[in-house]
Image (cartoon, helix red, strand yellow):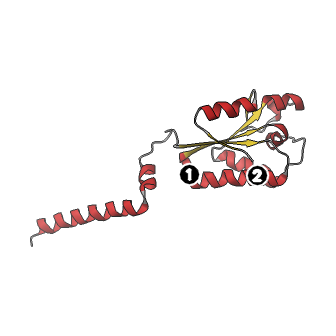
């Protein structure tokens, strides 16, 4: 066989092996490679965060982290904090918030998780936006924020 035929065979073989590799890895990875920076994610999820219980804090934040690890940059996550749960977003929480929870919330925010603070709850506590951690976003009514996010296609998670 001549060199032209061998090169053509190698090229076809390489293309087939590359295609088989993509098939073996699954469609998810192939789709991720086609995403552009700033493109809307496929998945959107909103968590209700409204309790003071330390175990509750850990469970919800673990779930947020697990979803983030599973979908990476192909998920948009929002945590809406109100009632007793809002204290995770306070510079000086009025209820006990463990150092581990504070660190987790801060870390998740650095990875793009949005934390929304209910304005009604803030009023009842006498808080202003200055009382919130720098990454927390003020929303007028937490329940309305949950509803509006669901109307935008966010999956709603509540414990």
Q: Residue furthest bottom?
A: 1
Task: Look at discs 2 and 1 and give the one toward the viewer.
Answer: 1
- The local crowd at label 1, few if under 14, some if 14 to 19, many if 20 or more residues have their Cα within 10 Å, is some
Q: Is residue 156 above or below residue 60?
A: above
Q: Is residue 73 above or below residue 142?
A: below
Report the residue at 9% width, 70% height from top. Answer: 2
Please tell me which of labels 2 and 1 falls first in the chain.
1
Q: Specify the label residue 56 is tagged with.
A: none
Q: Give the camera-side residue of 96 and 99.
A: 96
Q: Secondary structure at mark 1?
A: helix
Alpha carbon distance from label 2 to label 1:
22 Å
Q: Specify the label residue 103 is tagged with.
A: 2
Q: Specify the label residue 71 is tagged with.
A: 1
Q: Indicate the quadrant where residue 78 lies.
A: top right
Q: Indicate the quadrant where residue 15 lies.
A: bottom left
Query: Residue 142 vs residue 42: left or right?
Result: right
């Amino acid at each position: 066989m001549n060199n032209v035929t061998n090169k053509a065979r190698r090229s076809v073989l390489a293309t087939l092996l590359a295609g088989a590799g993509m098939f073996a890895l699954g469609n998810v990875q192939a789709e991720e490679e086609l995403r552009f920076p700033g493109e809307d994610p496929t998945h959107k999820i909103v968590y209700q965060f409204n309790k003071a219980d330390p175990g509750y804090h850990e469970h919800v934040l673990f779930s947020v982290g697990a979803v983030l690890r599973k979908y990476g940059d192909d998920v948009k996550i929002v945590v809406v904090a109100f009632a007793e749960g809002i204290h995770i977003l306070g510079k000086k929480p009025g209820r006990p918030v463990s150092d581990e929870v504070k660190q987790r919330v801060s870390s998740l925010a650095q990875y793009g998780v949005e934390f929304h603070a209910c304005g009604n709850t803030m009023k009842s506590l006498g808080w202003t936006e200055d009382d919130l951690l720098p990454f927390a976003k003020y929303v007028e009514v937490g329940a309305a924020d949950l509803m509006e996010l669901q109307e935008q296609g966010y999956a709603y998670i509540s414990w």
